[in-house]
Amino acid sequence: NAGVTQTPKFQVLKTGQSMTLQCAQDMNHEYMSWYRQDPGMGLRLIHYSVGAGITDQGEVPNGYNVSRSTTEDFPLRLLSAAPSQTSVYFCASSQLTGYTEAFFGQGTRLTVV
Amino acid sequence: AQSVTQLGSHVSVSEGALVLLRCNYSSSVPPYLFWYVQYPNQGLQLLLKYTTGATLVKGINGFEAEFKKSETSFHLTKPSAHMSDAAEYFCAVSAANAGGTSYGKLTFGQGTILTVHP
């Protein structure tokens, strides 16, 4: 079982560059989400999706775009990277029904210089 | 709206000592509560969760937590710390939806780094 797979694990970007963080899950989960983790701030929700074609904003959506064309994939796009987006990014997935918990990927450590 | 406060960003204990990590939450609807652990350079792993029923919840690696509605708390404990428990711990809350279930839209506390001394 692969679970939730994120790529790449590490990335360095220059200010103004764009990139896509990939996230894929093989558990047929309807719900997927992206968090960013910053020291002393826990994890903050960026965007989430409750199914293919349905996305919504979380707590800190500015500077990020998402789309959900399939159940399995939920990429996160940085449109024009800024140093404030230096962070560790986690993708998570879960079922929509039942007393479920979120399953997390291993994270992508992004540095914007 | 929901929020989570973890009291103490760093907790240090000796090996064999009691571990107590504090978590208080705020939720306008019945909460579902979770503790996750993060080892260095790893993702988050679920330790335990409270949904309904018994308020004392047992998790992996000897951890347990008690849901106290009157105190809006969900503190994590372990009777005897082990060196391998050194990690960062996150408390999280998820609200039940109209159907009485929940999904993974979590609000996290700021995390508590646990250090275990020999």
Image (cartoon, coloured by chain):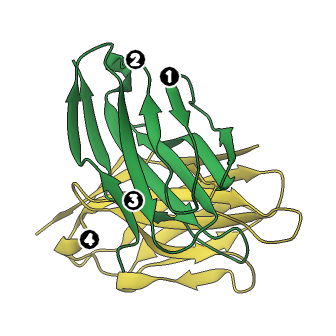
Q: Are marks 2 and 4 in contact (CB under 8 Å)?
A: no
Query: Cβ–Cβ below 8 Å for labels 3 and 2?
Result: no
* Vertical position of residue A3 compared to residue A92: above or below: below
Chain letter for the part of the structure drawn in yellow: B
- Residue under pointer 1: A63
Report the Cα–Cα distance between label 2 and label 4.
39 Å
Marks 3 and 1, Cα distance to the nearest angstrom?
28 Å
In this picture, residue A79 sits left or right of residue B34? left
- Name the chain letter of the residue that bears numbered label 3: B
Element carrying mark 2: loop
Q: Quadrant of residue B23?
A: bottom right
Q: On the rendered image, what quadrant is the N terminus of chain B found in?
A: top right
Residue annotated with mark 2: A80
In the rendered structure, which amino acid carries the disc numbered 3? Answer: Tyr
Q: Secondary structure at mark 4?
A: helix
Q: Check if mark 1 and mark 2 are on a common chain.
A: yes
Marks 1 and 2, how far apart at CA: 7 Å
